[in-house]
Image (cartoon, rainbow, N blue to C red):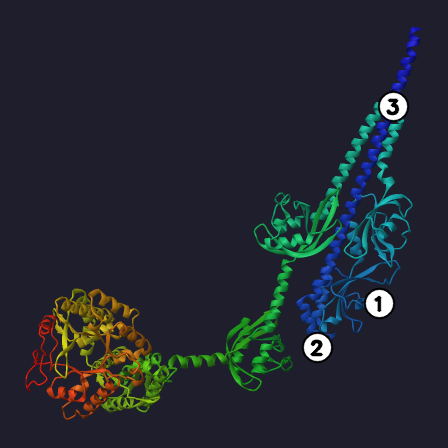
């Protein structure tokens, strides 16, 4: 009883527990089943969307290739070139083989049913390869004539009503005569169907359609993976309200509902690159849950028997489902890899962070990277630095489903750059966004196009004439340069035999050129040409023969340039190189080329050849006094005068102021000619308002008498010229062998002079200057003396000339200035009353920057008063740079230093300049003083009187140098000359002798001294 009583509650509890357990199991089973249904549905949606997106990418890639074909072929430079020439000959001629061959090659290479060029004005297909377009097709294509870019057009079907045809068209040119033509590519529907079919995975259990809106009504094309065949057909049986209809007319990309078949289903769409075209995938919901029916029935059947079996069955079902899912994913991955890696397209998939997720084999090969190197890398690293901003700008703002075309550059692993064209799209998978790019390597195509454009540009713009001939040597094409050079218009020579264009212009060499090209396929050289007007001209020509693959010549190309201007320029250059631009005479270069030949001819004929070198004396002073242009006119006049004595080919302008004449025959017979040349050269010349008497020095040397060759002949004439100048100029000197020895001795003397300055072998002697009125001492002139240890006393005229020629004159002049200042300071410190010391200033020293400062520093160093120094300047010195000389003299005068004009009357002084010089004293040159009192002294006396009168008018003191006789002194005194300097008064004496003179307060000689009284420091000889 107790047991029975206890059994009921236990049974109830067991029953309740079982029911509770069963309910729990049922609830859990229902929950698991519900989650499984949701998971299967999500997986099916992802699979459906991925499949549709994959198919859309494949379709877009196929469409991009068709559009690219139309774009590239219609705008290809060679196609335009050939079509342009076809228009010029008349479109549609039977011999337009180039266009027909190009169209046939495009059709056969890319498998188009029809490739045509349509004339939109005539509504006619003027060039056709393959199936000829119908009139309706041509009418549709002609309607695209005003459109830009590539267009997709629907074509009417000549067969069944639902068969679909389409074409890609593009206008060939935006404007110009070629804008009337349209490039027409008919698409093969079989290829389109094959593209759609191959893009559908075999594990996909749904149905796919290519759909579009036509006249606002959805229509579908063919099928993918279903029962449809491999033909593209148009079906307008899309029922209103069906998910297909809602999907195309609504905004959603995923729709659930009743399909056209009447079953519950879901549909996904993906937009294609053609406006209004979509790829639609439909999946029956019964197919989604088909995998759950059997496990559910097993669970219900086993529910009453054993719940554990249900759990086990459920576990087995879940395991089977997972295996099925993984298997399906594996098959999808294999299909994806087959599509992705099997084509030629460069495919790269990267996530939103820019990390590469996957890439095709073609992409790996293009970038030169292994898969493990590319996967996970930054996609921006594949682009050059200059392209990265453009890439970021391109993908900016993209949304899932968007696609954009691009053209750009990419970088290989070795750093090289290549060009790509393609598209980039954005897709979203399981909430994650990925960028996928599909591109084609167009580097080679761009290079080919660039070379073709370059070749066309070279042909049109080349400065050289280009002639293209066929294998019969008939002209088929010429460029503008050919017309410019020959005068023949293109229409005048097309079809003409090329030999007819060179008739009469060196036919033998023309035949040789043709023979060489036929034999060697190449010839280059100079050939005479003939213009249209009959004029012949030199030309440089290059001719080549072009052969086909079989080795047969199919064309000849000739290129030539007109050498006329070059030859004329060479002639002018040769003339200018060998002639002086100023005088027009042959120059030194010409002489260097001619003289050796003349010497050789003289030796062969046993005749003499004489060289005469003429040089203007002090020509630089003339330039500075009267201007460079006046100096140039003097040179021209001198050249014209010399040409009266010498033939034009025997007179040369050797240098700035130097001329060379060549005389053939015995030297003894040339003396009169040389005298005549010298006289004519020294004739007066008018420079503005001034009359100038030029001074010319002449050097003469002969071959073979005293010269061995052309070089020694010129050198010896130059030595003779130097001797003539040393003799005072205005004369000519015949070369003697001792002259070269003298030149060598001058070089040694220059070295010894440098040592003399350093070793203080030089000394100053001082020649007193006296007032003519009472013979009182007024000053002294410092005169340089050199007592050489071996040579003895060296004449100042010689070593001063050496110093000027060697550049030592500046150092020597500064030494004289310092020594004179030191002497004056010594006199002053000894309690004497030192007279002013006159120091000669060289031209080079005077013109150097800082000369005034140097004088001031020297005077300050030795304590010389301003009145203690007189600077003597020559006429030629101050006239060489008059304006600069005036400025320097004014600064010296402002310091209190007095300035004397030395050797007045021997240069080219201009009175207008003389009035501007801040002078204190004029010094009459000894050449005017010495003739006074002689039979030929009347002219000199008149000059002296004029100089004294002029100086008085300018308020300048006058001193005459070189006074040696009482008669000269009396004449100078009577003329009003203030002072004198010369041997009559005193010879130059050293410092010690002058100190004795300064210690007396009496004049050296009384004004009333009896005639014949010798001065205190007389001289037995000069």
Q: Label 1, on which residue?
A: 136
Task: Count residues near mark 3 (Cα–Cα under 10 Å), then give few for <14, some for 14-19, many for 20+.
Answer: some
Is residue 199 at least partly visible in the picture? no
Q: How many marks?
A: 3
Q: Measuring from the top left, give residue 678's x and y in whole percent.
A: 26, 88
Residue 352 is left or right of residue 705, and the answer is right
Is residue 838 at least partly visible in the picture? yes
Which circle, 1 or 3, is nearer the viewer?
A: 3
Which circle, 1 or 2, is nearer the viewer?
A: 1
- How far apart are the two marked residues, 1 and 2, measured between alpha carbons? 29 Å
Q: Residue at (49%, 80%) from the top-left corner?
A: 565
Between 283 and 473, which is closer to the camera in this rendering?
283
Which circle, 3 or 2, is nearer the viewer?
A: 3
Quadrant for the N terminus, please: top right
Q: Earlier in the sequence, mark 1 or mark 3?
A: 3
**Residue 89: assigned label:** 2
Quadrant in the rendering for residue 480? bottom right
> Element under label 3?
helix
Quadrant in the rendering for residue 977? bottom left
Q: Label 3, on which residue?
A: 22
Task: Count residues near mark 2 (Cα–Cα under 10 Å), then give few for <14, some for 14-19, many for 20+.
Answer: few
Residue 718 is left or right of residue 333, and the answer is left
Q: Measuring from the top left, give residue 94's x and y in whole percent.
A: 73, 74
Q: Earlier in the sequence, mark 1 or mark 2?
A: 2
Q: Residue at (25%, 68%) from the top-left corner?
A: 856
Quadrant in the rendering for residue 594? bottom left
Between 224 and 698, which is closer to the camera in this rendering?
698
């Amino acid at each position: 009883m107790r047991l029975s009583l206890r059994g009921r509650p236990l049974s109830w509890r067991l029953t309740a527990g079982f029911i509770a357990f069963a309910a729990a199991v049922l609830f859990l089973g229902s929950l698991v089943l519900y989650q499984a249904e949701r998971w299967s549905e999500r997986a099916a949606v992802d699979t459906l969307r991925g499949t549709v997106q994959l198919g859309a990418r494949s379709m877009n890639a196929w469409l991009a290739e068709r559009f690219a074909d139309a774009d590239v072929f219609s705008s290809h430079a060679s196609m335009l070139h050939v079509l342009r020439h076809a228009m010029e000959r008349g479109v549609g001629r039977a011999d337009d083989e180039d266009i027909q061959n190009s169209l046939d090659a495009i059709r056969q290479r890319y498998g188009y049913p029809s490739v045509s060029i349509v004339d939109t004005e005539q509504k006619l297909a003027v060039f056709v390869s393959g199936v000829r377009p119908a009139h309706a097709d041509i009418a549709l294509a002609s309607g695209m004539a005003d459109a830009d870019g590539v267009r997709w057009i629907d074509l009417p079907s000549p067969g069944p009503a639902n068969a679909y045809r389409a074409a890609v068209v593009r206008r060939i040119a935006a404007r110009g005569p070629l804008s009337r033509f349209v490039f027409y590519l008919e698409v093969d529907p079989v290829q389109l169907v094959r593209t759609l079919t191959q893009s559908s995975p075999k594990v996909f259990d749904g149905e796919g359609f290519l759909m579009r809106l036509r006249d606002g009504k959805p229509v579908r094309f063919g099928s993918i993976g279903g029962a449809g065949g491999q033909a593209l057909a148009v079906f307008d049986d899309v029922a209103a309200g069906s998910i297909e209809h809602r999907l195309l007319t609504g905004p959603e990309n995923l729709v659930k509902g009743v399909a056209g078949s009447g079953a519950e289903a879901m549909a996904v769409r993906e937009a294609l690159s053609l406006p209004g075209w979509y790829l639609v995938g439909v999946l029956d919901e019964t197919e989604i849950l088909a995998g759950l029916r059997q496990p559910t029935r097993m669970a219900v059947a086993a529910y009453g028997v054993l719940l554990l079996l249900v759990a086990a069955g459920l576990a087995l079902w879940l395991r089977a489902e997972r295996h099925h899912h993984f298997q399906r994913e594996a098959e999808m991955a294999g299909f994806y890899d087959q599509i992705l890696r099997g084509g030629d397209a460069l495919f790269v998939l990267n996530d939103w962070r820019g990390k590469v997720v996957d890439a095709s084999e073609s992409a790996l090969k293009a970038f030169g990277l292994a898969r493990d190197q590319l996967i996970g890398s930054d996609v921006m690293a594949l682009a050059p630095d200059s392209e990265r901003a453009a890439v970021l700008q391109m993908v900016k703002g993209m949304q899932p489903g968007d696609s954009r075309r691009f053209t750009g550059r990419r970088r290989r692993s070795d750093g090289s750059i290549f060009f790509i064209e393609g598209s980039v799209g954005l897709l979203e998978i399981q909430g994650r966004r990925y960028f996928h790019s599909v591109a084609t390597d167009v580097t080679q195509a761009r290079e080919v196009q660039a070379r073709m454009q370059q070749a066309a540009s070279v042909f049109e713009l080349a400065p050289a004439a280009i002639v293209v001939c066929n294998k019969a040597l008939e002209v088929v094409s010429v460029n503008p340069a050919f017309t410019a050079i020959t005068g023949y218009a293109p229409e005048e020579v097309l079809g003409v035999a090329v030999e007819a264009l060179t008739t009469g212009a060196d036919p033998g060499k023309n035949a040789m050129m043709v023979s060489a090209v036929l034999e060697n396929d190449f010839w280059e050289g100079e050939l005479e040409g003939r213009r249209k007007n009959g004029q012949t001209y030199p030309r440089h020509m290059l001719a080549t023969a072009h052969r086909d693959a079989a080795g047969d010549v199919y064309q000849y190309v000739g290129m030539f340039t007109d050498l006329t201007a070059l030859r004329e320029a060479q002639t002018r250059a040769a003339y200018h190189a060998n002639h002086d631009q100023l005088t027009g005479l042959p120059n030194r270069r010409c002489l260097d080329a001619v003289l050796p030949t003349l010497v050789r001819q003289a030796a062969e004929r046993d005749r003499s050849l004489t060289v005469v070198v003429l040089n203007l004396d002090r020509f630089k002073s003339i330039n500075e006094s009267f201007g460079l242009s006046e100096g140039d006119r003097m040179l021209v006049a001198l050249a014209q005068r010399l040409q009266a004595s010498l033939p034009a080919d025997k007179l040369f302008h050797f240098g700035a102021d130097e001329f060379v004449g060549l005389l053939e025959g015995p030297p003894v017979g040339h003396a009169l000619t040389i005298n005549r040349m010298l006289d004519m050269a020294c004739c007066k010349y008018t420079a503005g308002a001034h009359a100038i008497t030029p001074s010319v020095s002449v050097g003469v040397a002969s071959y073979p008498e005293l010269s061995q060759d052309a070089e020694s002949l010129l050198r010896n004439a130059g030595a003779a010229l130097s001797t003539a100048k040393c003799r005072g100029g205005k004369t000519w000197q015949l070369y003697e062998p001792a002259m070269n020895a003298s030149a060598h001795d001058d070089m040694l003397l220059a070295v010894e002079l440098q040592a003399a300055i350093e070793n203080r072998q030089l000394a100053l002697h001082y020649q007193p200057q006296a007032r003519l009125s009472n013979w009182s001492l007024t000053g002294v002139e410092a005169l340089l003396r050199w007592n050489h240890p071996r040579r003895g006393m060296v004449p100042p005229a010689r070593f001063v000339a050496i110093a000027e020629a060697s550049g030592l004159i500046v150092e020597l002049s500064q030494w004289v200035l310092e020594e004179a200042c030191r002497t004056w300071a010594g006199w002053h410190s000894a309690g004497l009353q030192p007279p002013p010391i006159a120091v000669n200033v060289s031209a080079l020293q005077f013109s150097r920057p800082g000369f005034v400062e140097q004088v001031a520093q020297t005077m300050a160093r030795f304590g010389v008063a301003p009145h203690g120094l007189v600077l003597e300047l020559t006429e030629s010195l101050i006239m060489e740079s008059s304006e600069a000389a005036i400025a320097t003299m004014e600064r010296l005068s402002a310091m209190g230093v007095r300035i004397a004009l030395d050797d007045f009357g021997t240069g080219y002084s201009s009175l207008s300049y003389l009035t501007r010089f801040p002078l204190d004293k004029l010094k009459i040159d000894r050449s005017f003083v010495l003739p006074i009192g002689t039979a030929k002294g009347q002219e000199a006396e008149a000059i002296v009187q004029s100089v004294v009168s002029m100086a008085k008018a300018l308020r300048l003191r006058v001193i005459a140098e070189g006074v040696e006789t009482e008669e000269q002194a009396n004449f100078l005194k009577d003329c009003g000359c203030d002072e004198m300097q010369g041997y009559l008064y005193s010879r130059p004496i050293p410092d010690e002798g002058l100190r004795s003179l300064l210690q007396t307060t009496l004049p050296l000689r009384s004004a009333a001294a009896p005639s014949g009284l010798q001065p205190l420091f007389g001289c037995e000889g000069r």
